[in-house]
Image: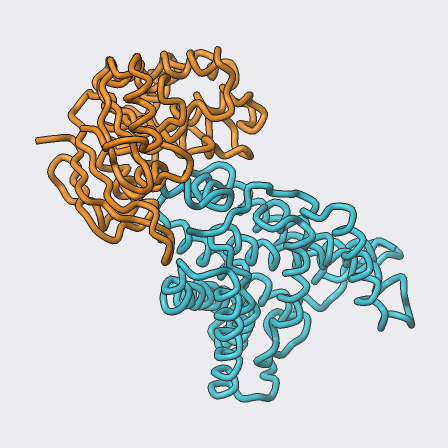
């Protein structure tokens, strides 16, 4: 039972991190970035390729590399589409996503690339008759630290205040002097950092990475951002947490019927959206870019 | 040299042109009104000056410097602040956070806290609500917050787009009373209003915009001349100068 709860919390934390990364970029650009999955994938590739240098260095390279790729996406594609309709941005992000998947195939191959990142995370901790996996504990700790750090940055710093303002009404934020390139660049960098954290947890669980590595969690995290309330950063984290926790609990309770996990998940998603169309934390100030 | 000099300004949204011939000249410390019917292009005019709406033709000079191709975030740093129509405060943020955002456009980074305190003195009602969520304020309080937020950047020119919108007559008097006090401190002001009498009562001169063009300039004395006002406003006669 304790393991079930810990699994649910760790899944929730993981999906919360992924959804917050997506929510940050959506907030300031109204861009639903499908290529977030490829940020997670590059983080995992960099971890596996550089793990021989030692875990701390490997993590440093993965975080830096993922953040740089996120910035490259912004500078090379999305910055040129600032005045475009949200639908154009969406299609562009699909394009970036597919391009990067093919690029990963060319560089790393289409087959899964295996490697052990942190084997100690697969072990168990025993408390009398109860055993819990180290992976769950580390994931929960990592999620708490990163979500806490992001909360501090968003709520307590000037740049965080500017990102919140830009997420609420970008047009007015610029009129007050908020530099659009600065807040959008910061949102992409933090989105990349969060993607690297998600990559670390996922690749230690799976032990391999392939070009489609980040697609599944990105789609479910996107569902989380919608459930939480598009345009709300707290909502994105909360929605992602809710989706991750629900998947984990459904997997546990459905047992042999776990193939229906996503069926039940999306039934619940539809019910939530019928009751609260604006999401759990509705941001009524969501406005289009001009 | 004028504080603001705009000539032959054209602006719009995509292929839709709204402003065809925007002209205005504002001196330091002057209060100028702009009136006109709905859809005349008043908000587009202010938006184009502030850099929020793309101008396609014409010149905009602020203290002799061309600002037509500048971003809104750079224009506010030069000392030109816009309070948009509908107040556009950040309802999810607190009053204090809204005011802190206003500091972003300051030219001088020192004295920020003092600037907030000075502005708060103009709007005492905000003092007791500084930690309130801005969305919980009344319409009049939100309008005062929007003006206060623009003022903490210490603009040389403050532009207000329909500050009376949705406010009760008493609150409107309060807001316009504050505008006179802001002007007394040396800040130039442009006020766009639907209520012509209201703005003409405090402005030295008032421009009339109709169908995207500045058609007339009225003086304070013209407030009493209903025929002249109607002719300028609705175009029932020759354009007036």
Residue A101: percent from left, percent from top:
53, 80
* A115 left or right of A164 in image: right
* B204 left or right of B179 in image: left
Q: Which residue is drawn at 48% across and 36% down?
A: A156
Closer to us: A85 or B212: B212
Closer to us: A57 or B54: B54
Residue A63: percent from left, percent from top:
47, 63
Figure disc tally: 0
What residue occupies the far left of the structure in this picture? Answer: B1
Q: In which quarter of the image is the N terminus of chain B?
A: top left
Task: Please tell me the colour of chain A.
Answer: cyan
Q: The orange chain is which one?
A: B
Q: In which quarter of the image is residue B137?
A: top right
Residue A66: percent from left, percent from top:
47, 66
Q: Can residue B110 be seen in this view?
A: no
Q: Residue at x 32, y 37 (%)?
A: B210
Closer to us: A271 or A104: A271
Q: In which quarter of the image is residue B98?
A: top left
* B193 left or right of A257 in image: left
Q: Is residue B15 visible?
A: yes
Q: In which quarter of the image is the C terminus of chain B?
A: top left
Q: Compared to A234, does A209 lie above or below?
A: below
> What's the image's color scheme?
by chain
Closer to us: A109 or A277: A277
């Amino acid at each position: 039972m304790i393991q079930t709860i810990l699994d649910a919390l760790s899944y929730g934390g993981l999906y919360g991190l992924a959804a917050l990364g997506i929510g940050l970029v959506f907030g300031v650009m109204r861009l639903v970035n499908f290529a977030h999955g490829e940020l997670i994938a590059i983080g995992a590739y960099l971890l596996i390729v550089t793990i021989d240098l030692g875990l701390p260095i490997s993590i440093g390279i993965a975080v830096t590399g993922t953040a740089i790729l996120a910035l490259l996406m912004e500078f090379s594609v999305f910055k040129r589409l600032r005045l475009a309709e949200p639908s154009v941005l969406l299609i562009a992000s699909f394009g970036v996503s597919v391009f990067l998947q093919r690029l990963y195939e060319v560089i790393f191959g289409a087959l899964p690339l295996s490697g052990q990142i942190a084997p100690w995370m697969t072990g168990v901790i025993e408390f009398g008759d109860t055993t819990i996996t180290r992976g769950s504990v580390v994931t929960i700790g990592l999620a708490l630290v990163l979500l806490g750090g992001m909360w501090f940055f968003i709520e307590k710093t000037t740049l965080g205040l500017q990102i919140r303002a830009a997420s609420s009404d970008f047009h007015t934020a610029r009129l007050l002097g908020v530099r659009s390139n600065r807040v959008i660049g910061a949102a992409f960098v933090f989105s990349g950092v969060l993607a690297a954290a998600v990559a670390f947890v996922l690749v230690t669980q799976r032990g391999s990475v392939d070009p489609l590595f980040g697609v599944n969690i990105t789609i479910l995290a996107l569902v989380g951002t919608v459930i939480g309330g598009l345009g709300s950063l707290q909502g994105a984290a909360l929605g992602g947490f809710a989706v991750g926790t629900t998947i984990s609990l459904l997997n546990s309770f459905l047992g042999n019927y776990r193939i229906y996990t996503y069926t039940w998940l999306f039934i619940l998603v539809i019910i939530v959206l019928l009751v609260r169309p604006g999401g759990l934390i509705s941001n009524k100030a969501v406005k289009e870019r001009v | 040299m004028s504080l603001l000099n705009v000539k032959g300004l054209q602006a719009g949204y995509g292929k839709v042109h709204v402003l065809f011939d925007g002209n205005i000249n504002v001196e330091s410390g002057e209060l100028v009104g702009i009136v006109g019917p709905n859809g005349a292009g008043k908000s587009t005019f202010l938006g184009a000056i502030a850099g929020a709406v793309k101008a396609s033709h014409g010149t905009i000079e602020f203290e002799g410097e061309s600002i037509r191709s500048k971003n809104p975030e750079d224009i506010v740093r030069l000392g030109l602040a816009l309070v948009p129509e509908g107040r556009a405060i950040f309802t999810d943020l607190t009053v204090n956070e809204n005011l802190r955002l206003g500091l972003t456009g300051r030219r001088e980074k020192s004295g920020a806290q003092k600037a907030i305190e000075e502005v708060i003195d103009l709007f005492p009602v905000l003092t007791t609500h500084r930690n309130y969520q801005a969305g919980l304020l009344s319409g009049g309080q939100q309008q005062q917050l929007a003006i206060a937020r623009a003022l903490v950047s210490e603009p040389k020119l403050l532009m207000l787009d329909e500050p009376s919108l949705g406010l009760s007559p008493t609150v409107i008097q309060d807001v316009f009373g504050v505008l006179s006090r802001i002007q007394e401190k040396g800040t130039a002001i442009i006020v766009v209003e639907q209520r012509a009498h209201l703005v003409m009562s405090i402005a030295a001169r008032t421009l009339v915009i109709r169908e995207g063009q500045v058609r007339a300039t009225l003086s304070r004395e013209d407030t009493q001349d209903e025929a002249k006002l109607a002719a300028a406003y609705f175009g029932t006669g020759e354009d007036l100068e």
